[in-house]
Amino acid sequence: MEIMAFLSAMKKELREVNYGDFHVNLAQLSDNYYHNADAAILADRSIAAAEMNDLFCRMEKKADPMAIIERRFLRGLVEFAQTGNPPLKCRSLDASLFMDSWGNVYPSIMWNYKIGNIRDTDYGLEKLWNGELAAEARSMIGSSRDPKHWTSCEAYQSIIGSAVLPIKRHPRPDITDVDGQSNAHVQNELRNT
């Protein structure tokens, strides 16, 4: 079932629900988290981008911080679906990291690049955070050799971090509203968030 058909059906059943109450994500490849890097199962990018753009255009604008971040995430998800590139530079090992239930530490939930295990450092992150493998991962991120992904687990810190410390942004594709009209006012709002 298409995303918008499903969400519209939900709204009919639960009239008090707004489109902004839903969180959507795009299935992505990750050997680390999903164990599907060798799978050839990917959504048609143009269909996914169109559906997420439709949802984005239907979301009401709210002034609360989480709603603003969620709108920026979804706008970025549209861009990612269109281009395959994240709309903001990755903040892994700058603003975040991922630690699995065994104590293995990775730059992000989507990147299968282990920088160590917290058990090997007396449960201290500092040695891993400042270690050689973390420095190499940061170098890969700096030269855009990191995996390309845009999931809420990783994107939220990129969104918040870019508001605090600007990072070079990728070119932005045009986003149009449900009727195919330019949605420049929404683009400007999100560029300023």
Image (cartoon, grey):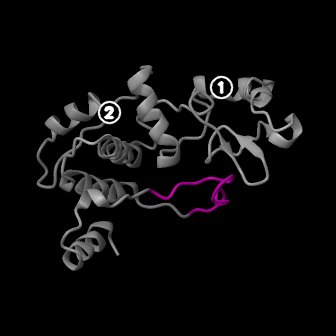
Can residue 36 be found in the magenta stretch?
A: yes
- Percent across and percent down for residue 46 are 34, 55
Q: CA distance from mark 1 to mark 2?
A: 24 Å
Q: Viewed as shown, does residue 159 lie left or right of 31?
A: left
Q: Residue at x 35, y 29 (%)?
A: 171
Q: Is residue 186 magenta?
A: no
Task: Tell me: residue 123, above or below residue 180.
Answer: above
Figure check: 14 above or below 117: below
On the image, the x and y values in percent for residue 50 come to: 28, 56
Q: Which mark is residue 115?
A: none
Q: Is residue 147 above or below residue 52?
A: above
Dot 1 amino acid type: Arg
Q: Which residue is mark 1?
A: 138
Residue topped by disc 2: 172
- The earlier-in-sequence mark between 1 and 2 is 1
127 sits to left or right of 26: right
Residue 164 located left or right of residue 191: right
Amino acid type at mark 2: Arg
